[in-house]
Image (tube, grey):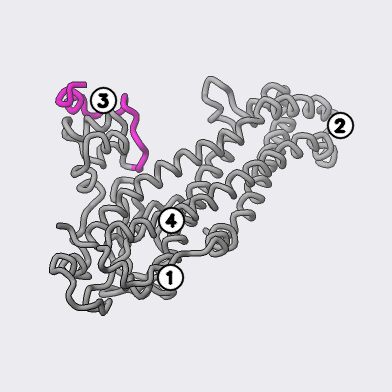
Amino acid sequence: MPTVNEQLQAAAISHAVDLQHLSNAEARKIIKLLNSVDSDLRAQLIAAIERLGAESYTARHLNTVLSSVLALNKEVYATIGEALTQSVLDIGHYEVGYQEALFRQVIPEQVIVQVDLASVSASQVREIALARPFQGRLLKEWLTGLEDNRAARIRDGIRMGMVEGQTTDQIVRRVMGIKADGYKDGLLERSRQDIDSMVRTAISHTAQGARDAFYKENDDIVGEVRWLSTLDNRTSAPCRLRDRLVYTNDANHAPVGHKVPWGAGPGRLHWCCRSTSLPIVRSYEELRLAKGLPESTRASMDGQVPQSTTYGAWLKAQSAARQDEVLGPVRGKLFRDGGLSIDSFYNDRGKYLSLDQLRERDAAAFSRAGL
């Protein structure tokens, strides 16, 4: 039977996968909100540029005619801010509840009744999500900065177009892009990319902060924490370096048996960090539990750091349904029957390959999988 720490490791990897799916969904939701004003923005841009006129163009006049455009930009970021604030708070509360439920599930009942399992308060979750900076700024500061950057891109696009003598339609296309290219050729595509990265980072920051808080509230049970990185072609060098390393469960997070610093911690080390942490529960002897517990219970509480399990190895051991849930049905079948590894689904720059690109790269894998 797996020990408590082995069960926690398997759960941590599985939970990290689920959080990535949640992060993907939240990023799509927020970008959809940003895109929801595109038609109004286009109409107001056209009206503003025509009012501006090449003959009367000045920086002051530009700001005047763009007032309705900038007001719309401010409004949509306010809506995004409300939605994202609620999302990160919900995720923080969920993470705390998940960790407590997990501990009660994997730690034997005879042990649970002897330890004082503590929780994390709503005010602590709120502080983690909204009052602690990530990548140098608070959530509200990032939102303000992204709003300002988008407004600057709109102004810059109009300025460049006016200087180059472009038509109204050409300027609008320069700012917003064209439908045939999925609007990715416009200056505002960068704003979508920026908010995508910010949403993912805010979520990982909040989820990891909630985990940290839960572990520290239960430092009599959790002696150390282990860094877990998702090892694939997208994994950053700093996270690869820290994968599987152990740290103390306190404010310092001192290295245990190595010299690599904790830094900002998993989920926060860099933008869009996907690393997570694994709690190492103290041994039966360290917890000073009552005598007379069954041998199986004592054995499950051995306190040992479990043997390393990579993301790929974990996924290999899951059911076909779970693999399809993580990878999608086609990639799941390629993973099971086509001989493709996790790394095969990415290029050398860590970009997820489309199914057409995968087929072009390794048609034999599709044949082996019967696809």
Q: Is residue 132 visible?
A: no
Magenta residue check for 361: yes
Tell me the mark number nearer the camera, choosing from 1 and 2. 1
The three-letter code of the residue at mark 2 reads Ser
Q: In this image, 119 relative to 48: left or right?
A: left
State the quadrant of the N terminus.
bottom left
Q: Are marks 4 and 3 in contact (CB under 8 Å)?
A: no
Task: Classify 10 Å Cα crowding around label 3: few (below 14), some (14-19), many (20 and above).
Answer: some
Distance from label 4 to label 1 (Cα)? 13 Å
User: Of label 1 and label 2, which has the lower sequence position?
Assistant: 2
Q: Secondary structure at mark 3?
A: helix
Left or right: where does residue 306 sit relative to residue 77?
left
User: What amino acid is at disc 1?
Assistant: Glu
Task: Give the mark nearest the N terminus, 4 or 1.
Answer: 4
**Callout count:** 4
Q: Quadrant of the C terminus?
A: top left
Which residue lies under the disc numbered 1? 217
- The region drawn magenta spans 349-371
Q: Residue at x 17, y 26 (%)?
A: 369
Residue 163 spot, x, y in % from top left:
73, 33
* Label ID, residue 56: 2
Residue linked to disc 3: 359
Q: Tell me: residue 320, above or below residue 169.
A: below
